[in-house]
Image (tube, rainbow, N blue to C red):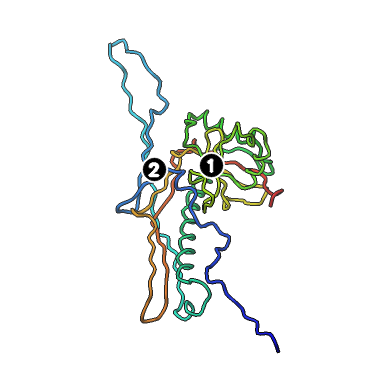
Amino acid sequence: MDTAYQTQYRQEFIKGFEAGATLLRPCVTTEAVIKGNTAVFLVADSGGATAVTRGVNGLIPARADNLTQNSAVLQEWHDLVRKTGFNVFASQGDQRRIMQVTAMGVINRKIDDSVIQELNSGTVAVGALGAVPNVSMFQNGAVKLQNASVPWDSNITFLSQPSFLAYLEQAPEFANAQYVDIRPFAGETPDWRDAPMAYRWRNTLIVMHPNLPGKGTTSEKSFLFHKSSIGHAANTGEVETALGYNDEQAYSYARCSIYMAAKLLQNAGDVVFTHDGSAYA
């Protein structure tokens, strides 16, 4: 036999396809909790008051401000990966690094899930089962926000299903460079990045997210919201990571933990779109 084939295993691992970064923390109002299990967000306004004139008694009528306290009760969330010393030794790739990367990804997905669940509890609705996304649907949501006195500033985010963005990209009002400003989510335009692209259109940050409710169905959900409409509280330092080795039982472990909660603070600032993305499923 004149052949002696050899198999070579690549030691640098290739990440599987799953979301591993939180896209939503920069888009919401955040609070760092030093100690305790509840974070309270205060929403303050005039309650829709109008200016008054001086009364016949010569005094200016007084009023109270409208103060609403919203409590987010923190819960603990963990992901723990454990592998025996033999498995780490005998397996392909840097198994300790793999454990650390996957554990961090699990927690980051949970952060986004907590925000998405709160956004999905909003009651300002646009669209319907089977409705095809288009520019008019987006504009309907924008008008609802502005009619509710939500400021159309640089704090508006459109959290989009992949299908909604696919439909928008076919519209000249969106695709034309005169209308849309395209920037990476991180800000600059490097040759390589590990964060997805985001659009800024009509002064709205458009973030495509792979894990929104109803993905690939006739009742997908997307969200248009102001940063002040949703809060996210987490323990100081946020994600805790631990990587170690147990000498007695000869195993390695990686753990990521966070204490957190999300809370819808102002329902009027959160528009929930229901639309059909099944054509692109």
The image position of residue 195, as x and y in percent, is 52, 51
Quadrant that contains the N terminus: bottom right
Question: Extreme front residue here?
Answer: 2
Element assignment for label 1: strand
Q: Which residue is mark 2?
A: 70
Task: Give the label, 1 or 2, closer to the camera.
Answer: 1
Residue 272 to residue 212: above or below: above
Quadrant in which residue 65 is drawn: top left
Question: Extreme bottom residue here?
Answer: 1
Element assignment for label 2: strand
Residue at x-position 35% and y-position 45%: 40
Residue at x-position 60% and y-position 47%: 161
What amino acid type should be assigned to the residue bearing mark 1?
Answer: Arg
* Callouts 1 and 2 close, C-beta under 8 Å: no
What amino acid type should be assigned to the residue bearing mark 2?
Answer: Asn
Residue 192 to residue 77: above or below: above
Choose between 233 and 154: the one closer to the eye. 154
Choose between 31 and 85: the one closer to the eye. 85
Q: CA distance from mark 1 to mark 2?
A: 34 Å
Mark 2 nearby-residue class (10 Å; few <14, some 14–19, many ≥20): some
- In the rendering, which numbered label is found on residue 205? none
The image position of residue 120, as x and y in percent, is 53, 46
Q: Which residue is mark 1?
A: 183
Residue 119 to residue 203: above or below: below
Residue at x-position 44% and y-position 46%: 263
